[in-house]
Amino acid sequence: MAPPRPLRIGVLGCADIAWRRTLPAMAAAPDIEVAAVASRDPGKADRFAAAFGCASVSGYEALLASSGIDAVYVPLPAMLHAEWVEKALRAGKHVLAEKPLTGDAESAGQLLRLADSLGLVLLENVAFPHHAQHARVAKLIADGVIGDVRDFTSVFTIPPLPEDDIRHQPDVGGGALLDMGIYPIHAALHHLGSDIEVVHAVLRVGARTGAVVSGRILACTPGGVTADLVFGMEHSYRSSCEFAGTRGRLWLDRAFTPQPTFQPVVRIDRQDHHEEITLRADDQFANVVRYFAAAVRMEAGAADRTAASLRQAQLVRDAERTAMRIEVP
């Protein structure tokens, strides 16, 4: 029997994350074909098309109208997601959308329900849970290597961005809460469970731009496990998860953006015991695009991620509602 034809994916937009990580992973996957890239700038589309051996399309509408496209990848700026994800779904396309899915919980819920009603896959591209290091950490915690977890800390911060970066434009890029804040929020959901609730937050807001540039969220599970979630774009680079338990602590550096060749190290401290476990390298972007293709084909193991995306959006909303906002230069 002949193998199924590759899933033909069109790309709406020429973002850096698409160029560096997602499209190389798609191009390397045997069951995926990058069929076309659309841009409002023909020069950008031509550059991507030449690099990934696909068609160059002028304008997003033209790509969505193509009968030869099974699914679309949407790496547009955050605040444009809702419009184009909806248009893609109504055009009958499965969608892999960069995080955040949308800028607010209400529209995220509407899109997830729309996809379900149409029998289409809508997957938010939060890639890090697909890296093997997080499964290994979860097993170590479940095995009681540090006892019962009492506190969780997660940090994702990056150095200051240029003033013209779209993340300084709240109506386009959405700011640091929607960009960097998604990582520690989703990590708390992933490792502590969906019943975690926001207790309070502090958001630093640029006086000139009105964009959130950094912040801190305190959350808690019903059982009293606390989560300290830190994010921002005015720091040194940090990307970590740390668990404090009754018998010790465990932490993981490069929790969110490891390169495919990077071997993560899990560090465990207990009283007089210090241990470092070097894990195998893994490619979380290759894993997430394979997961998306499997979900489209309704293959075993492709679990529904709708609930996680919706709960993440709700926690972002709750952080915004409870936050103390501090204006900074």
Image (cartoon, helix red, strand yellow):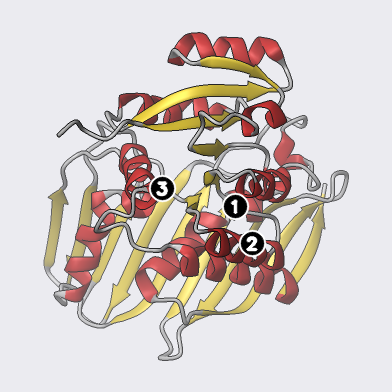
**11 and 75: which is toward the camera:** 11
Please state which amino acid type lies under the numbered disc 2. Ala
Q: Name above or below for residue 293 compared with residue 188.
A: above
Residue at 78% x, 48% y: name it. Answer: 170
| Residue 171 appears left or right of 10 | right
Q: Residue furthest bottom?
A: 223
| Residue 191 appears left or right of 16 | left
Residue 295: give x, y in percent of width and height. 36, 52
Mark 2: secondary structure: helix
Please state which amino acid type lies under the numbered disc 3. Ala
| Residue 108 appears left or right of 295 | right
Q: Residue furthest front?
A: 1
Q: Name above or below for residue 247 compared with residue 313.
A: below
Residue hosting label 1: 100
Mark 1: secondary structure: loop
CB atoms at circles 1 and 3 under 8 Å apart? no
Q: Name above or below for residue 199 compared with residue 13.
A: below
